């Protein structure tokens, strides 16, 4: 259950709470210095700090939807010691789902370093004596894995081929092949090009090289949208162009899975009963007023007789112009 307090938290209930109680008993039986946190303090922190304080002033618990994915914990607990404090905790399964859930709740705002977890015990039994950030992301390891990916190997091979064709490969001229909108457009000083690339990898920058939506991501978004729209007899489809445009640099800030999931969730809540009444062949644009994401679509009759909402493309643009019907969410 989502609770708005000094932090935004998800309070434990049901099967997860039962599992935590069993794990808490194991911790206490094996660690003499461990003091259990009471049931009332068991939670997953979703947001905290200055960014959350700004949102909290006008927020109510009813403003936040509950998670719609399966909630579970990892099978083993961990221990963290820091500055005289000690915490026994367990990570939540599906960290990516939690991250995107929080991004959807807060419209893109989240702490990229946060590991979603439940603190079960500490040295005093007081929640304030727990270690807040139990783990830190290993950015060096993430970068190493990214650079060894098929995508980046293909990217570097493309640059080398371009330089060989231009006769500039390995000539030490201090120039790099430069990309714009995913295409090589010429050369520029390596300090400018690499500086831009490094900036794009920083947390919170406009574009991160490993934030692209994949075909697998889009399939998961489609499954989610299909599940909620099935209640009104609508099937969601994406064109191949949709994926290309979702990852287009012209969006400036990358379009995320969480944003698209949130867009379809709000579209269903606001227009779920209205869209089935539209005639086949109608074209319209879903306009997310919070994220500036636009999704033009057309309604077709599918082979199974269901109404297909075909999302043709997407783009992040504040003043997107269209002559078709607009559905603001």
Image: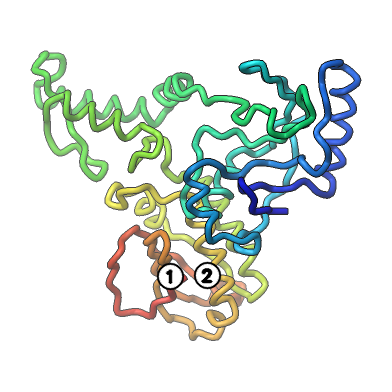
Task: Tell me how far mark 2 sits from mark 1, CA to CA.
Answer: 8 Å
Q: Give the image's coloring scheme.
A: rainbow
Q: Nearer the viewer, residue 118 or 200?
A: 118
**Any mark on residue 136, and which?**
none
The answer to whether 173 appears left or right of 83 in the picture is left
Q: Nearer the viewer, residue 44 or 193?
A: 44
User: Is 3 above or below relative to 46?
Assistant: below
- Check disc 1 and report the residue beneath it: 286
Could you say which quadrant of the image residue 311 lies in? bottom left
Evaluate whether residue 76 shows in this view. no
User: Is 236 above or below relative to 112?
Assistant: below
Could you say which quadrant of the image residue 321 lies in? bottom left
Mark 1 closeness class: few <14, some 14–19, many ≥20 residues within 10 Å:
many
Q: Nearer the viewer, residue 258 or 52?
A: 52
Residue at x 34% of width, y 59% of height: 315
User: Is 114 above or below relative to 256?
Assistant: above
Residue at x 48% of width, y 43% of height: 50
| Residue 123 horizontal/vertical position (percent) | 77, 22
The answer to whether 188 appears left or right of 200 in the picture is left
Mark with earlier residue (2, 1): 2
Q: Nearer the viewer, residue 285 or 258?
A: 258
Residue at x 32% of width, y 35% of height: 200
**Any mark on residue 267, and which?**
2
Could you say which quadrant of the image residue 47 lies in? top right
| Residue 21 horizontal/vertical position (percent) | 87, 36
Q: Secondary structure at mark 1?
A: strand
| Residue 279 horizontal/vertical position (percent) | 49, 86
Mark 2 closeness class: few <14, some 14–19, many ≥20 residues within 10 Å:
many
The answer to whether 219 appears left or right of 117 in the picture is left
| Residue 265 horizontal/vertical position (percent) | 57, 64
Label pair 2/1, CB-CB below 8 angstroms:
yes
Evaluate whether residue 232 shows in this view. yes
């Amino acid at each position: 259950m989502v609770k708005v307090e000094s932090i935004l938290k998800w309070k434990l209930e049901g099967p997860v709470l039962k599992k935590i109680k069993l794990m808490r008993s194991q911790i206490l039986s094996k660690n003499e210095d461990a003091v259990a946190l009471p049931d009332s303090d068991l939670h997953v922190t979703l947001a905290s700090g200055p960014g959350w304080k700004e949102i909290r002033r006008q927020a109510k618990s009813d403003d936040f939807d509950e998670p719609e994915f399966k909630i579970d914990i990892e099978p083993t607990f961990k221990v963290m010691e820091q500055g005289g404090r000690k915490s026994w905790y367990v990570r939540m399964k599906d960290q990516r789902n939690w991250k995107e859930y929080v991004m959807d709740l807060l419209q893109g705002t989240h702490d990229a370093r946060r590991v979603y977890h439940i603190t079960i015990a500490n040295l005093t039994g007081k929640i304030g004596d727990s270690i807040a950030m139990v783990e830190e992301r290993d950015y060096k390891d993430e970068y190493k894995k990214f650079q060894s990916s098929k995508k980046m190997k293909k990217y570097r091979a493309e640059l080398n081929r371009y330089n060989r064709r231009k006769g500039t490969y390995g000539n030490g001229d201090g120039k790099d092949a430069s990309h714009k909108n995913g295409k090589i457009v010429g050369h520029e000083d390596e300090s400018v090009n690499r500086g831009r690339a490094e900036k794009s990898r920083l947390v919170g920058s406009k574009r991160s090289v490993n934030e692209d939506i994949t075909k697998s991501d889009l399939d998961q978004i489609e499954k989610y949208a299909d599940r909620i729209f099935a209640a009104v007899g609508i099937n969601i489809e994406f064109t191949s162009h949709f994926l290309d445009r979702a990852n287009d640099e012209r969006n400036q800030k990358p379009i995320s899975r969480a944003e698209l999931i949130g867009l379809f969730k709000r579209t269903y809540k606001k227009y779920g009963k209205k869209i089935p009444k539209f005639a086949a062949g109608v074209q319209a644009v879903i306009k997310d007023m919070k994220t500036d994401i636009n999704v033009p679509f057309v309604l077709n009759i599918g082979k199974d007789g269901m109404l297909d909402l075909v999302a043709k493309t997407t783009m992040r643009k504040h003043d997107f112009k269209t002559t078709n019907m607009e559905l603001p969410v």
